[in-house]
Image (cartoon, rainbow, N blue to C red):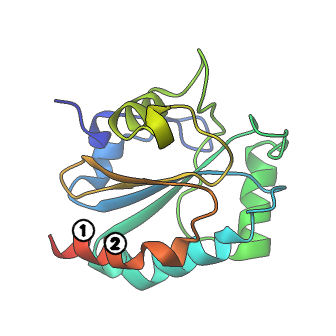
Amino acid sequence: MSTAYDFAPRAADGTSAPLDAYCGKVLLIVNVASKCGFTPQYTGLEALQRKYAGRGLEVLGFPCNQFGAQEPGDAAEIASFCSLTYEVSFPVLAKIEVNGEKADPLYAFLKSEKPGLLGTEAIKWNFTKFLVGRDGQVAGRYAPTVKPEALESEIERLLEG
C-alpha cells in the first residue's frame, strides 16, 4: 500500500524532495497561490507550523497556477513573496499541477485516497488542504474555505495518535 512518504516531488530549486524525509511526521499539504483571496491563510499555516513543529507537524506548500492564474511567479518570486509577506518558514516546493494529465503524482495519490464532495477527486481551488498521519496515510481533506486554525483539533489528534 502506498503512503505519502513514497513520493518525491520537486523542491523549489528543482531538485528531488523525497517525502520519506518526513516519515513519522504529521503533514499538512496545501496547494498555495500568492494572488488568491485565500492567500492570507499563509498566516494560519505558518502559525500551525510554529505551534506544532516541535511535536511533529510539517506544513508543505505546493504553489499551483491552475486556478485563475493566481500563482504566476517563478520559484524565486514565490519564495520572496512567502518570506517577506508572511514570514513563511515551512517548505514551499516547486510549482505543480494538481489536476489533469500533468497532475503531480503526490496529488494524484492524495485525491484518490480522500475524494472530495460526492466522490469527486478534482481539486476545486487554491488552498485545498490534506492532512496526513504519522503512518503516511491521508487522514483528511479540507476545502479552501476551511481556515488552517480549524484543523487544530484534528492535528492534535494525529500528533497524539
Relative side of 60 to 124, left or right = left
Q: Residue at x 24, y 46 (%)?
A: 137
Relative side of 6 to 9, left or right = left
- Residue 88, given in percent of the width and then of the height, sits at 63, 71
**Which residue in the structure is indicated by mark 2?**
155
Crowd class of label 1 (few under 14; some 14 to 19; many from 20; radius 10 Å): many
Quadrant location of the N terminus? Answer: top left
- Residue 35, given in percent of the width and then of the height, sits at 84, 55
Up the image or down, 70 lies above or below 45; here it is above
Residue ranking furthest to the top:
101
Closer to the camera in the image, 17 or 38: 38
C-alpha separation, residue under disc 1 versus residue under disc 2: 5 Å
Numbered mark located on residue 67 in the image: none
Whether tag 1 and tag 2 are in contact, CB under 8 A, the answer is: yes
- Residue 150, given in percent of the width and then of the height, sits at 49, 76
User: What amino acid is at disc 2?
Assistant: Ile
Q: Residue at x 45, y 28 (%)?
A: 108
Closer to the camera in the image, 125 or 47: 125
Relative side of 97 to 17, left or right = right
Q: Residue at x 68, y 49 (%)?
A: 126
User: What amino acid is at disc 1?
Assistant: Leu
Give the secondary structure at mark 1. Answer: helix
**Which residue in the structure is indicated by mark 1?**
158
Up the image or down, 147 lies above or below 97; here it is below
Residue ranking furthest to the front:
118
Number of callouts? 2
Q: Quadrant of residue 131?
A: bottom left
Q: Quadrant of residue 100?
A: top right
Q: Residue at x 77, y 39 (%)?
A: 67
